[in-house]
Image: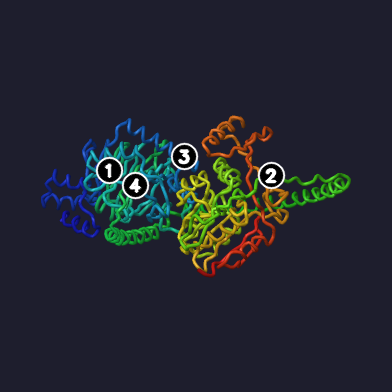
């Protein structure tokens, strides 16, 4: 009958007999008389059930439960404990990926119902399993695979031909902390296994275990805030109602749950008695068979509901046992009220003191105003940006009679060499500058301007987006966060490399010749690119190229530096002309390095054609200074530029954080 019951349950749960169970059946010949005796005698199995040695012990009162002592040796135990302690330190310092580390929630810590957790492979919370794209955690560490899982395979817990665990949950208990009765998560395959470290501790199994009233999970939050007194939880000899089996999990032992023991029976950890606490490692395999998970979930939910009702009824029948808890709660309420009154008194005292301080501050302010009237106000300082040296913007093709068409875009539009060829001023004072300062520039540009955030938020959430002149990709984050897909390009190899390291799809390309097909993107971004283009013909060409790849009806956002920084600019620059040189102070890449040493490194890149040759040393600021060419725009200039671009209309223009911005809609093919 026992075999038939186990077979029926496994059909319902979608699982097969474990390797340990198969071994047990091969080693022990259960005849009918023995099975009848076990049914009569095994209503409760004590912790003395089975002799402790290196052999696997099974518990007839809880089908599918097995205990393996001495799974790990002392050296492995100490290595794993050391690893766990290192991971805890990293987790507390927020240096582990995603939600790998979880501290104890305060409301649980007050009741000692909690423990620090480390989760590898799969993240679970409140009996829910999260996918990688929802909550990310570290993969299972090598030390656990090589030194613990491998040992469990050798002892027959897991079968390499069936499956190996891909997840591990580490629970770190302090003295007095406990785990309430629960049925394990149905989203994992059976069997699963828990290895005990540091100290021995008692684990109980049963159906609808009537837990201690102070820890009863069926009570309301307001009734469950007091932790059980130590003299009560140290009494581990008491048998709870609904308890079927009690196992002392010794240090280095493994507890294996399969079949009914994992899907029907509850298990709980009594409050830890050891001063040094306890660590448990639970190894499981995520089950991707949706039908099996659904069957297992239906079955476990049915049992959980029954157990909750059973505990609730047991608690109602034993209310007299918690009179002391209620009295303690009343005392706590009184103390809380007294603390609240004392806090209000301190608050009134603080308000009176602040009022006196405000009156004194007002008196000092008036005194300072009188003093300032007789002193000269120090003028506000700005970072002056000097005009471009004479002759630097001279057309490199001037005097060239051969300005014939040498290339053609996919629509048959002629592209003149004079327009598409990059002038030396843009190559030396823009492209190469950004290549050599890319890492430092990236460290200070990490968020989009407000106008860009607002523009992206108003576009289609699942849009396909082009970021022309994407820089370090700071604007691409907003698109992805909103559910869109974005491709970026920039002519700076240094910045594109940074984008690639962040996982963006990007290309090195010139915005004058965008390497994308026409009318494929829902909208486009062209941010802080126009003010680096040195001639009006090239600016028009770049605008045409950006709009060419946008679908009809789609919008492109163009932003460029404003000449009128006094209207609310935050750059601190004072532009002395519209075509200016804006200095960038590059700090040495290593601590203690002198600017001259940094300049020598940059000069090596100059010889390789990868860096600008005009860098100078600023000893006062301890930097190497490079100049960036910029053409800053006056009010109305951007709108006038698009009057010369066919097939589009300006739908909005505004000033934002020192930039002129225009939104341009594509109106025809």
Q: Position of residue 515 (x, y in %)?
A: 47, 55
Of discs 2 and 3, which sits in the foreground?
2
Of residues 479 and 561, the one drawn nearer to the viewer in this rendering: 561
Q: Secondary structure at mark 1?
A: loop
Instruction: Identify the residue at image location x=27%, y=61%.
Output: 291
Alpha carbon of mark 2 to alpha carbon of mark 4: how far? 64 Å
Label 2, label 3: how far apart the Cα atoms are? 54 Å
Residue where numbered disc 1 is placed: 47
- Residue at 77 percent across and 48 percent down: it is 357
Residue 577 is situated, as x and y percent measured from the top left of the image, at 71, 50
Q: Earlier in the sequence, mark 1 or mark 3?
A: 1
Q: Which mark, residue 167?
A: 4
Q: Position of residue 405 (x, y in %)?
A: 51, 56
What residue lies at 43% left-to-right and 48% top-to-bottom?
113
Q: Are marks 2 and 3 in contact (CB under 8 Å)?
A: no
Comes first in the chain, label 2 or label 3: 3
Residue assigned mark 3: 90
Residue 313 location, quadrant:
bottom left
Q: Earlier in the sequence, mark 2 or mark 1?
A: 1
Residue that label 2 marks: 389
**Picture mark count:** 4
Q: Are marks 2 and 1 in contact (CB under 8 Å)?
A: no
Precedes in sequence: disc 2 or disc 4: 4
Measure the alpha-carbon separation of dots 4 and 3.
19 Å
- Viewer-nearest of labels 2 and 4? 2
Q: Verify CB contact (< 8 Å) between mark 4 and mark 3.
A: no
Q: Secondary structure at mark 2?
A: loop
Camera-side mark, 4 or 1? 4
């Amino acid at each position: 009958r026992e075999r038939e019951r186990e077979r029926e349950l496994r059909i319902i749960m979608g699982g097969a007999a474990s390797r340990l169970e198969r071994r047990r059946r091969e080693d022990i010949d259960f005849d009918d008389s023995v099975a009848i005796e076990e049914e009569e005698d095994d209503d409760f199995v004590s912790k003395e059930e089975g002799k402790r040695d290196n052999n696997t012990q099974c518990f007839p009162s809880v089908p599918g439960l097995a205990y393996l002592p001495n799974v790990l040796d002392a050296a492995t135990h100490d290595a794993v404990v050391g690893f766990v302690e290192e991971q805890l330190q990293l987790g507390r310092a927020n240096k582990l990926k995603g939600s790998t580390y979880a501290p104890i929630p305060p409301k649980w810590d007050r009741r000692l119902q909690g423990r620090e957790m480390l989760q590898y492979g799969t993240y679970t919370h409140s009996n829910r399993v999260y996918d990688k794209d929802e909550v990310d955690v570290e993969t299972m560490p090598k030390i656990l695979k090589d030194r613990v899982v491998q040992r469990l395979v050798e002892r027959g817990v897991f079968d390499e031909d069936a499956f190996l665990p891909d997840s591990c949950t580490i629970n770190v208990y302090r003295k007095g902390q406990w785990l309430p009765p629960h049925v394990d998560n149905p989203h994992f395959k059976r069997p699963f296994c828990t290895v005990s470290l540091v100290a021995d501790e008692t684990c109980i199994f049963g159906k609808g275990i009537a837990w201690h009233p102070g820890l009863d999970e069926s009570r309301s939050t307001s009734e469950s805030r007091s932790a059980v007194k130590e003299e009560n939880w140290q009494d581990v000899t008491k048998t709870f109602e609904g308890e079927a089996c009690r196992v002392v999990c010794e240090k280095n032992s493994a507890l294996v749950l399969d079949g009914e023991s994992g899907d029907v029976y509850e298990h709980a950890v009594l409050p830890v008695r050891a001063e040094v606490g306890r660590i448990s490692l639970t190894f499981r395999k995520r089950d991707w068979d949706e039908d099996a998970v659904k069957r297992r979930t239906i079955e476990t939910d049915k049992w959980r509901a029954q157990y909750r009702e059973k505990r609730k009824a047991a608690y109602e029948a034993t209310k007299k046992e918690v009179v002391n808890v209620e009295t303690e709660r009343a005392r706590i309420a009184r103390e809380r009220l007294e603390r609240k009154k004392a806090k209000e008194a301190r608050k009134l005292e603080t308000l009176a003191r602040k009022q006196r301080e405000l009156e004194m501050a007002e008196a000092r302010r008036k005194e300072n105003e009188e003093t300032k009237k007789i002193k000269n106000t120090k003028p506000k300082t700005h970072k002056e940006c000097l005009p471009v040296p004479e002759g630097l913007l001279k057309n490199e093709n001037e005097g060239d009679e051969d300005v014939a068409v040498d290339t053609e875009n996919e629509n048959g539009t002629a592209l003149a060499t004079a327009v598409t060829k990059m002038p030396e001023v843009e190559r030396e004072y823009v492209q190469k500058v950004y290549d050599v300062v890319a890492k430092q520039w990236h460290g200070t540009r990490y968020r989009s301007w407000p106008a860009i955030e607002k523009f992206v938020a108003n576009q289609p959430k699942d849009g396909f987006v082009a970021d022309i002149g994407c820089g370090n990709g700071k604007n691409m984050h907003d698109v992805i966060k909103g559910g869109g897909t974005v491709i970026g390009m920039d002519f700076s190899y240094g910045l594109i490399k940074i984008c690639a390291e962040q996982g963006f799809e990007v290309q090195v390309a010139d915005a004058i010749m965008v390497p994308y097909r026409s009318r494929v993107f829902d909208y486009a971004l062209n941010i802080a690119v126009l003010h680096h283009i040195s001639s009006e013909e090239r600016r028009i060409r770049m605008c045409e190229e950006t709009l060419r790849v946008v679908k009809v009806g789609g919008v492109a956002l163009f932003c460029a530096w404003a000449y009128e920084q006094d209207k609310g600019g935050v750059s601190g620059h004072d532009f002395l002309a519209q075509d200016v040189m804006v200095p960038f102070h590059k700090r040495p890449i290593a601590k203690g390095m002198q600017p001259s040493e940094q300049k020598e490194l940059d000069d090596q890149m100059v010889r390789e054609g990868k860096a600008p040759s005009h860098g100078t040393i600023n000893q006062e600021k301890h930097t190497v200074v490079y100049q960036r060419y910029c053409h800053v725009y006056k009010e109305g200039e951007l709108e006038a530029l698009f009057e010369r671009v066919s097939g589009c209309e300006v739908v909005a223009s505004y000033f934002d954080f020192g930039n002129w911005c225009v939104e341009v809609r594509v109106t025809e093919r």
